[in-house]
Structures are given as C-alpha cells and as structure tokens.
Image: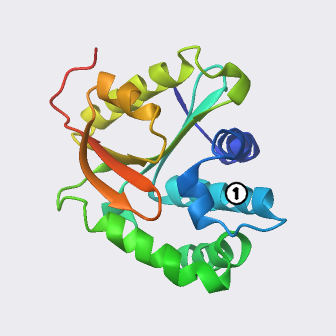
Amino acid sequence: MIKAGKADKPLIIDILSNSFEDNQSVNYIVKQDSKRKERIRALMDYSFEICYMFGAVYLTNDRKGCALVLYPDKKKFSLLSTWLDIKLVLNAIGLSRAGKAMSRESAIKKNYPKEHIYYLWFLGVVPSDQDKGIGTQLLKEVIKDSQDQQRPVYLETSTLKNIPWYEKIGFKIYSELDFGYKLFMLKRDREIPIL
C-alpha cells in the first residue's frame, strides 16, 4: 500500500466511481438524473479532497485498488472545506436534496464513539480486478495502519454481500440505519489481530 498524491486523483476517482456506480448508499446521496454518473464522480472528487486534507488516501502497489480514510477529529472548518461542501451540493447532491443528505450524515455520526476513530470512507478495486484478493489485502493493510495509529476502524456498507467479507476480517455490525435501504454500521476494535 502506498500513500496517494494529488497526481493520483483522476485514477482514484475512476476506481471509486466505477466500483460504486450501483451502490445504494451512493445513489441515495447523488441526484438521480441524466448526470448521475458525473454526480458520482463529483462525490468521489469531494471524498478524495476531504480525506487528502483530513485523513489519508491509499493505493495498492499495483494501482488497482484504493482506500479513502478520514480522521473525523482532525476535520476542521476552513474556507477550502466550505467551498468543497458547496461544490458537493451543487455538483453531486443537488440543492433540493441537501437537507436529506445532511439528515443522513447526522444520523450516521450520532452512532460514532467519542474516541478518535479511523473512518474507512471508501475502499474500491477496479471492477475487472475484483474477487482476486486485491481488496482483502488492501483492507488488511488499512487495518494495520489503523492499529499503528491506535484507532479502531469504522465504516458503513449497504452491500449485503460485503458483510461476511468484513466479518471474516474481524468487523462486527454495531448498528443498522434505515433510509429506505439498510445501512449497516461496522467497527473493528484495534486489539483484534489481523489474520
């Protein structure tokens, strides 16, 4: 796993946009219109920028997978982050849906602990290279990184088939939210060894 730089942003946006094109949670957030695919790309652009500022962005060594990590305790108000929020609303969510998106985000954050966490926002692999162990290896490296920082890993998924995969690596569901689709909130304590 390598730390991504700004020059890697187009590749990361491609990987994540293609990986999450049919994701329920992503499609709940982005406005569903003729520009849906562009809106997903705008969401991934935003996510990259926020994680680059307040977390970490990783690529697999073969550049076929990526992970966006956020440290919520480090996220601070700035003119740039405010501008990114505005662009997210205009380019991905849509003004009429901003309240819905903010309400969802608030419901999720209420379930976070008070301690400093390692929030795995997105993990994606080039679709043609999925199911080859790339994502599993990347996830194990991300977990190792979280342990080095002594932070438990938190994430959400709306993809049912991913739950056994996460559980096999030591994650546990600690909450479920209903937004017209089920969003499963998972965590992995930092003391659990990596298998």
Q: Position of residue 62 (x, y in %)?
A: 65, 19
Q: Quadrant of the C terminus?
A: top left
Which residue occupies 58% across, 18% down? 131
Position of residue 167 in the picture relative to residue 75 (left or right):
left
Position of residue 21 in the picture relative to residue 57 (left or right):
right
Mark 1, secondary structure of its residue: helix
Q: Position of residue 165 (x, y in %)?
A: 40, 26
Question: Around disc 1, counting alpha carbons within 10 Å, would you say few (fewer than 14), some (14 to 19), or many (20 or more)?
Answer: many
Q: Quick check: can you spot residue 60? A: yes
Question: In the depicted view, which residue is nearer to us: 79 or 127?
Answer: 127
- The residue pinned by badge 1 equals 40
Q: How did the renderer colour the structure?
A: rainbow
In the image, residue 195 sits, relative to residue 147, either above or below, namely above
Locate residue 107: give its quadrant: bottom left
Locate residue 42: give its quadrant: bottom right
Question: In the depicted view, which residue is nearer to us: 90 or 12?
Answer: 90
Give the amino acid type for the residue marked by disc 1 in the picture.
Answer: Ile
Which residue occupies 42% across, 69% down? 105
Q: Position of residue 192 (x, y in %)?
A: 18, 26
